Image: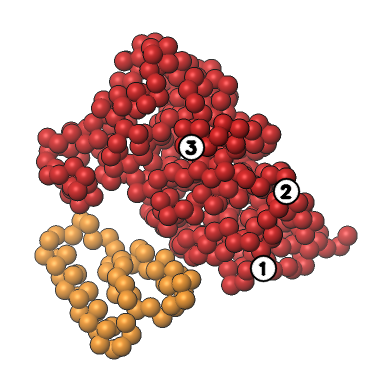
Chain colours: A red, B orange
Amino acid sequence: MSSSRVEQGRSAEERAALFEAPDDSDAINRLYRERRWGDGLPIVPPTVERVGRMLAHTRRPPGDIVARVAPGFGAATVERIAINSVMAGCDPEALPAVIAAIEAADAAQFNLQGIQATTNSVAVWVIINGPAARQLGVNGTFNCLGQGTWANATIGRAVRLVLQNCGGALPGEMDRATHGQPGKYTFCCTENEEANPWEPLHVERGFPRDSSTATVVGAEGTMNMNTHAKDAPQLLRAFAETLQHPPSNEYTHGGEPWLILSPEHAEILKSAGLTKAEVKRQLWELSKMPARRMTDKDLMRVHDSRSKELGTIGPDTLLPISPRPEDIWIVVAGGPGTHSVYVPCFGNSRAVTREIADKK
Amino acid sequence: MTVCSTAFLTLGRAQAKALGNPALPIAVIAHPFGLRKRNEVRELAEQCVRDIVKLVSEGKA
């Protein structure tokens, strides 16, 4: 074959354009590089055949618009999501998970406009729960936020490519991130549901245990918390002190902090008789931060953002990290080890979960 | 019309175009201004007000 037919979505049209390209992955990648259709890594050419194999895993018509992706508001059709998923290297079976993640990111409370266009480093973290996580091979154990698992790497990458290519969020143009972060290449995992002593995330968020979901979180990054504490109060104190940091969007705006507890740390808390709700309540209390730790300028921003919630804010005010204890979210993931992770969030965003509903 | 700093002008222009209003008048303030003194910020604000009035009176807004 001297040439392959390659598809690429265009913002001015609902239907993906079709063009001829040489049957040479180097040449195709040069083209994608020149046109800024990628993320800086080589892509898998989205040939008609590959996109067709991907589309076979959804009942939704190719032209269905899943989202109008901020800030450019290009249409993320099922077909375009499939194209970007091929580019990312996804297994075809993963398409419904990517569609669910894009649906979730489009919800108003996620504030995709802010997340895509901000100077902040925020990335979109995708958490897959339920049977689909196992079927797709999403990793929630060893190195679940690191390299080495195809599903984690490619599902997260596909979401990023849709956000960039349909939303027009090109770095330096509509994506105004000062630095960005590595999680903007890919950021996806599942929970370690077998090792979770409490209910899994999707059940806590109102979905049946046997359903599969994609949850999106506006995540500023990851902060490792290595503590050998074996005592629940000391463990919670160590976590709470990690949450406290003055130049924080969460303390400034009233955030939605996420913790990824290792199974060992979760078991210590569970063995102490703590429910997840009680862990959240204690973390919320222990992580209150004296407002005087903020700089003067940042304290003015806190006042602008949170005075309706907290009343008059002075240097002695104890700032809670989030408006309510239940705004703290906890997932259990990772392998053996004394490490948990704090995922600071964008502040003006709330996570959204959507069911992965259209598996065949 | 809208107001933004130079750091966000590319975003503003692209988003105005995406939303079907490519000619949207935008009054622009030089970025950054967070480190400027209060009197300098006032000057910037007064200039911006003049720019807004000009854009509005020219019928572009």
Residue placed under numbered mark 2 in the picture:
A57
The amino acid marked with disc number 3 is Gly
Q: Is residue A160 left or right of residue A245?
A: right
Circle 1: is it few (<14), some (14-19), or many (20+) Cα within 10 Å? some
Residue visible at 73% across and 68% down? A18
The residue lying toward the viewer, choosing from A338 and A93, is A93
Mark number displayed over residue A206: 3
- In the displayed structure, A355 sits above or below A341; it is below
Residue A312 position within the rendered picture, expressed as x and y whole percent measured from the top left: 12, 44
Circle nearer the N terminus (1, 3): 1
For marks 1 and 3, give the one nearer the viewer: 3
For marks 2 and 3, give the one nearer the viewer: 3
Residue A50 position within the rendered picture, expressed as x and y whole percent measured from the top left: 77, 53
- In the displayed structure, A134 sits above or below A275; it is below
Residue A235 position within the rendered picture, expressed as x and y whole percent measured from the top left: 35, 17
Residue placed under numbered mark 1 in the picture:
A15
Marks 1 and 2 share the same chain = yes
Q: Give the alpha-carbon distance from disc 1 to disc 2, as whole Å.
A: 19 Å
Residues at marks 2 and 3 touching, judged by CB atoms closer than 8 Å: no
Q: Give the alpha-carbon distance from disc 2 to disc 3, as whole Å.
A: 26 Å
Which SS class for mark 2?
Answer: loop
